[in-house]
Every structure is written in structure tokens, then in C-alpha cells.
Image: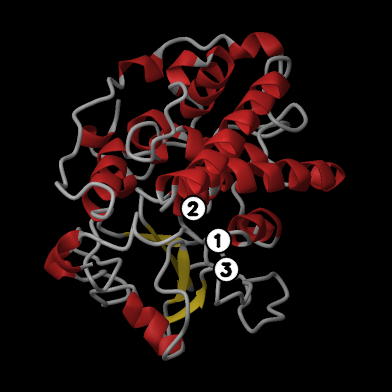
Amino acid sequence: MSGGGNNEYGRKRFQRSRAHFTDRITADGRDGWPVEAGRYRLVVSRACPWASRSLVSRRLLGLEDALSLAIADPIQDDRSWRFTLDAGDRDPVLGIRFLSEAYDRRETGYPGGVSVPAIVDVPSGRLVTNDYQRITLDLATEWTALHRDGAPDLYPKALRDEIDAVMADVYEDVNNGVYRAGFATGQAQYEEAYTRLFRRLELLAERLAGQRYLVGDTITEADIRLFTTLVRFDAVYHGHFKCNRWKLTENRVLWAYVRDLHQTPGFGDTVDFDHIKRHYYQVHSGINPTGIVPRGPDLAGWAAPHHREELGGRPFGDGTPPGPVPEAERVPASGRP
């Protein structure tokens, strides 16, 4: 990724890597990593939809004081995620310049590259996990002793089978589907991904036409996972990834649904449209060799009334909204609508 780009994007068939480091941080510490306030650091990029899931979950559950946060530069170089947003180009807690240093302290010659989200053990500086599918589920179910008062239940036991089924379809056709379309190297690959993506979005729109949230009457992990793709749709996937059958703003149900979530504390206050656009358009140089970042789309509509409350639903169930964003974690004005 010399010069801040990656020429392989758009030249090699896309395949989502499985997480290589799948240790879990649990209440009983069975993998050697017990839940402990202040011990771990969550490393994310606000540009990355997979990492953004953990940003939303951490906010909703009130884990800001228990699990510290490192935000990587959205523009990668050939050593991947770097801490050039911090003074001295080093993470102030871990003391490293590149996330790869925490990976190397855990294992040399690891497959799959350096990905976010990642959780690092602060005392040793070693990576604990980069299991993007598991991290948020464990934040919801294993970190409960450190949840804020009024934290919602994002993965309720009674609904887990249905949540898992919905998330599996969303993962395959939507979360991953936009990437398969965008990084396709042949027409047939692209058209298959495109067709499956929009068919799934239409099915989701039908489901959400009569209910406020994907499963049950409260926000769950399923909504978090769909949100982080939908919030990027018009800004990057519609044009950059050629997912252009229609814009999200042209789908009445999904546009109202994603605005509802964006306006819910814990969702929109984690989104940085500036980081999102600069990452996709400047790093994916195999797709966008000029590195030009588009000015649009107009973000003004994100604050418009959505009227989804007319469907009922209780966003936080028996809980309460999260408190204000910590000052050090506020998204700069350049990234907000």
C-alpha cells in the first residue's frame, strides 16, 4: 500500500478473511483473557464498517471507561493501520506507531494481514483478538459486569436464533455483498453480487416496513450490523463499489430506518463521513487510481424526521440512552452531517 493506496483492490477477487486470532475475552477468563476494566484497548478505524460495529456496541453498553479506544488514520500505508492521528504518530497508551506491532508481539508470520477491530492487551502490548464477528457479541454478553446502568440487552437469549439467522443473511448478501461487487474482477462476479445485494435489501425493506427494528421491538446486534453498511451506502458503495441500482435515499423504508438509528445516541455519534470517504476513495487505488474524493453526497438529510417511532418499539428496551460522547472521542465537525 505504498503511497497510501492498495493496487490489489479491484485487481484480485475479493474474499473476506476469517479472523486468525480468535481468543475471547470472557467473564471467566477461560482463554486466559478475563474481562477487566482498563486492561484492554480497542483499536478501530472509523472508516471500517466491521470496526464500527464495536464502536456502536461500546457506546450503547457504556464501556468507554472500561475499554479504552485507539482510532487509526483512515489512510493506510504499506504497513496498514497507523496511529498518525496521535501526537508523535504513536498511540499514547500502547506506544506503537502501527497496529502491526501488536500483531507481531503476539505471533510472527501470521496469515490474513492486519485488520480492525482489534483488541490489544495493554500490559503486554500483544494482540488478543481480531475476531470481528465475535467481539461485539462478547461485549454484549461477557462484559456485563462493566456495563453502564441502563445498558440495553443487544443479544437477548430468547431472540438469539432469529438474530443469528437475520445476521447471517445480512452478512452474506449486504455486509460482504457490497465488497464482492466493488472488488469484482469480472462482469459475472459483479452482477451476481449486485443482484443478491439488492434482492436482500428489498427483503429487508419489506421486513422493516411493519416493524421498527430487525428482531423484536428493541435495538439488537442485528441492527448494529446492518447500520454500519447502510450508513456508508450512498457515500461510498453506490458509486465507488458500483452498487447503483438505487441510492439509499431513494428507498423510503431503508432511508427512514437508517436515519432513525443514526439519530439514536450511540449510532450516528460514532460515524465519521470524512474518514469513510477518504479511506475508500484514497486507499482503494486499484478501483480509484486518481485518488479523487467526491464532494457529495449532501449529508443534510440525515437530520430529517424519520417517523419510525410511529411503528412503536423501544430503542433501549427497559434501559436508557447512553450519556454524552466523551470529549476526546467526539467526531470532528468535518465528519458530521
Q: Would residue 329 be found to the left or right of residue 152 on screen?
A: left
Element type where label 2 sits in the image: helix
Q: Position of residue 214 (x, y in %)?
A: 70, 31
Precedes in sequence: disc 1 or disc 3:
3
Precedes in sequence: disc 1 or disc 2:
2
Residue 154 seen in this snapshot:
no
Q: Position of residue 246 (x, y in %)?
A: 46, 21
Residue 303 falls in image quadrant = top left
* Residue ID at (41%, 11%): 304
Q: Which residue lies most toward the bottom here?
A: 108
Element type where label 3 sits in the image: loop
Residue at the disc numbered 2: 50
Residue nearest the viewer, comparing 204 with 225: 204
Residue 316 falls in image quadrant = top right
Precedes in sequence: disc 3 or disc 2:
3
Rendered image: mark on residue 109: none
* Residue ID at (72%, 80%): 30
Q: Would residue 270 be found to the left or right of residue 128 on screen?
A: left
Q: Position of residue 128 (x, y in %)?
A: 52, 77
User: Is the residue marked by circle 1 packed among few (<14), some (14-19), or many (20+) residues within 10 Å?
Assistant: many
> What amino acid is at disc 2?
Trp
